[in-house]
Image (tube, helix red, strand yellow):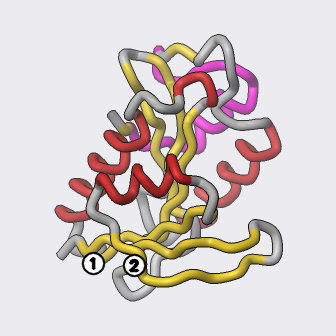
Amino acid sequence: MIIEATAHDFAVLLRGAAPNDLRLVPDSAIAPPEVLQMLADLAGAIRTGFAPAAWLIVEDGELVGLCSVARPPEDGEVHIGYGVAASRQGRGAATRAIAELLTWAGADPRVGRVTAETGVDNLASQRVLERNDFVRIGERLDVEDGRLICWQAVTD
């Protein structure tokens, strides 16, 4: 399940606690503190013009990951990123979260398509998108992340 992540939720996470009566994954972090701060700042900036901007990925009351809008939406396109705690990967949480996000996107008239990118070697993330009917629309080279596959799902 996904739950909208607020500025308060990110503040709680940055203090090392779980928001909303959730439990943190005890054996691995959902993201390093610097990534949490970057996501909090990004969500805060995007939230001024578009909300929701981020979601908590929750499984059985445990906060297992995050999903967020990765750049300000433009012309009906919402670009997302997501991650799940290492010890909870491979259990379908990301696939279920992205399916739920697509349901939200399909009901939101502001959203016509959802896009994402995966590293060419990140087969698990590619499968998450394929299972949710994303299609490959190209590749690009990123200075920091190397070769990326570009994906799109049409929601309208």
Residue at image position (69%, 26%) is 29
**Is residue 34 positioned above or below 64 on the image?**
below
Q: Which residues are magenta?
A: 3-21
**Is residue 73 positioned above or below 94 on the image?**
below
For the N terminus, which image quadrant?
top left
Apparent side of residue 61 relative to residue 67 in the rendered image (left or right): left
Residue 112 marker: 1
Residue 114: give x, y in percent of width and height: 37, 70
Q: Residues within 10 Å of mark 2 (few under 14, many from 20)?
A: many
What residue type is disc 2 on?
A: Glu
Residue 77 marker: 2
Judged from this view, the residue extending furthest toward the bottom is 75
Residue 148: give x, y in percent of width and height: 62, 72
Apparent side of residue 3 relative to residue 13 in the rendered image (left or right): left
| Secondary structure category for the residue under label 1 | loop
Apparent side of residue 153 relative to residue 136 in the rendered image (left or right): left
Q: Residues within 10 Å of mark 1 (few under 14, many from 20)?
A: some
Residue 26: give x, y in percent of width and height: 64, 11
Pick the residue in front: 98 or 23. 98
Residue 97 falls in which quadrant of the image? top left
Are the residues at dot 1 and dot 2 in contact (C-beta closer than 8 Å)?
yes
| Secondary structure category for the residue under label 2 | strand
